[in-house]
Image (tube, helix red, strand yellow):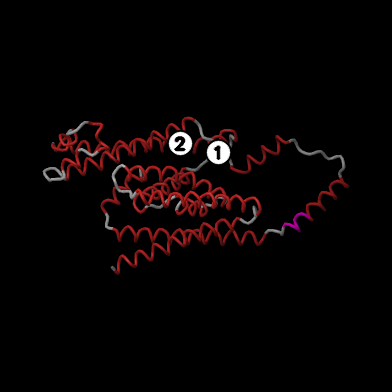
Amino acid sequence: LATYAGVFLNWLLPGWIIVLLLTLILCIMTLTVARAAMQQHAEEQELPSPAAASIGEAAAKDGDAQAQPSTQAAPAEMVLATKSDSGNGCEVPPVCSKMRNRLTSRDVMLAFSTEFVVIVCSVFHFHAETCHRTLGTPGEDAACNHPVISYIGRGTMQKLMGHNTSAAAMLNLTMFIPAGVCTVVLTGYTIAMVKHEGWHVGEAMCYHAMAVVTGALAGLVGIGGGLIFAPFFLGMGVEPSVAVATSSTCVIFTSSSTTLQYLLTDRIIMSLVFSYGIVNLLASYAGTSLVHYLQDTLHTRRSYISLIVGTGVLISALLSLGKLISAVAG
C-alpha cells in the first residue's frame, strides 16, 4: 500500500525534492548502522579470544570428568526446549517456529493476492487520471485507450471519465480498495503476532511504521530493502546475518510492486533494465556468498557484516548527495 502512495507522489513531486528526501534518508540510515556496528564491536571486545575460550572449555571438561565421572548429559529434548524458551520468549515454541521461519500456503496466497490488488488498482488509477486530464485534447484517444486497460473495451475509459460521478467513483475506489485490503491483512497478522509469538503491540507497530516508510520510499525514490530494512533491523538488535537475509526477503514485495506499477505505466527504460539487471544479479550472488562466508568463519564478529551494510549505505548517500548538488546548481 505504501508503494502505491510512493508511486503517486513520484508522479507529483519535482525531481530535486525526491533527491533531497533520498539523501536525508540515506544519511540517517548510515548513522543508524554506524551506531549499531560500534555497539557490536564493543561487545565483541569484551568476549574472550577463541583460543582462550577453547582452552578454558577443555580444562573445565577435564575437571568435570575427574570430579563427577558418573554425570550424564541432559536429554536432548530438554536442551532444545530450554534454548527455545530462552531464545525468543515464546510460550508455544512450535507455533513460533512455524510462523517465524516457514511459509504456509495461506501466507503465499495472501501475499500474492494483496500485491495483485495493489498493482491493478494503482495502474488503473494512473491511467484513469491520465485519461481524465486529456479529455478534449489531441492525446485523448491514446491516453484513454492504453494497451494495459484494453481489456475493459475501447472507449470504455472515455465514457467513465466523461461523467463527474463515475470519474470520482473510479478514482476513489482504486485508492480505497487497496487500502482496505492491506489494512485487513495487516490487522490479522498483527493479532497473530501478539497472541502467538509474544510480541508487544508497540513493537509490532514500530515494525509496521518502518514498513510503511520503506514502501513509500521504494515507490517515491526507488530505494528499499538493504538500504532501509537492514539498517532498521540492526538498530532493533537483530543479528546482522538474520537482518541481511530478512531484508532481502522483504524487498521482494516492495521491488516487485513498484516495478510492475512503473512498467505498466510506461515509466521504465527497458534498455537500462537488462544492462543493469545482469550486473545486479552477479553482484547479489557475490554479496550473498560473502555474507555466508563471514557468518561461517567469523560468527562471533557480527560487526563485520554491519560494517559492510553501512559502507553500502554510505556510498549510496554520497552518490545521492552529489546528484542533489548538481540538481540544485543546474
Residue in the image at 29% along x and 40% along y: 123
Residue 206, image x, y percentages: 44, 48
Residue 74, image x, y percentages: 76, 38
Quadrant location, the C terminus: bottom left
Q: Residue furthest bottom?
A: 329
Count neighbours of disc 2 (C-alpha within 10 A) and say few if under 14, some if 14 to 19, many if 20 or more. some
Circle 1 SS class: helix
- Residue under circle 2? 191
Q: Quadrant of residue 156?
A: top left
- Residue under circle 1? 101
Is residue 270 depicted above or below 179 in this figure? Answer: below
In the rendered structure, which amino acid carries the disc numbered 2? Ile
Residue 3, image x, y percentages: 36, 46
Residue in the image at 13% along x and 37% along y: 162
Q: Nearer the viewer, residue 199 or 46?
A: 46
Q: Describe residue 141's horizontal placement relative to residue 31 as left or right.
A: left
* Comes first in the chain, label 1 or label 2: 1
In the rendered structure, which amino acid carries the disc numbered 1? Asn
Quadrant location, the N terminus: top left
Q: Which mark is residue 244?
A: none
Residue 117, image x, y percentages: 34, 35
Is residue 184 depicted above or below 244 in this figure? Answer: above
Q: Describe residue 47's horizontal placement relative to residue 258 as left or right.
A: right
Q: Quadrant of residue 320?
A: bottom left
Q: Which residues are magenta?
A: 50-54
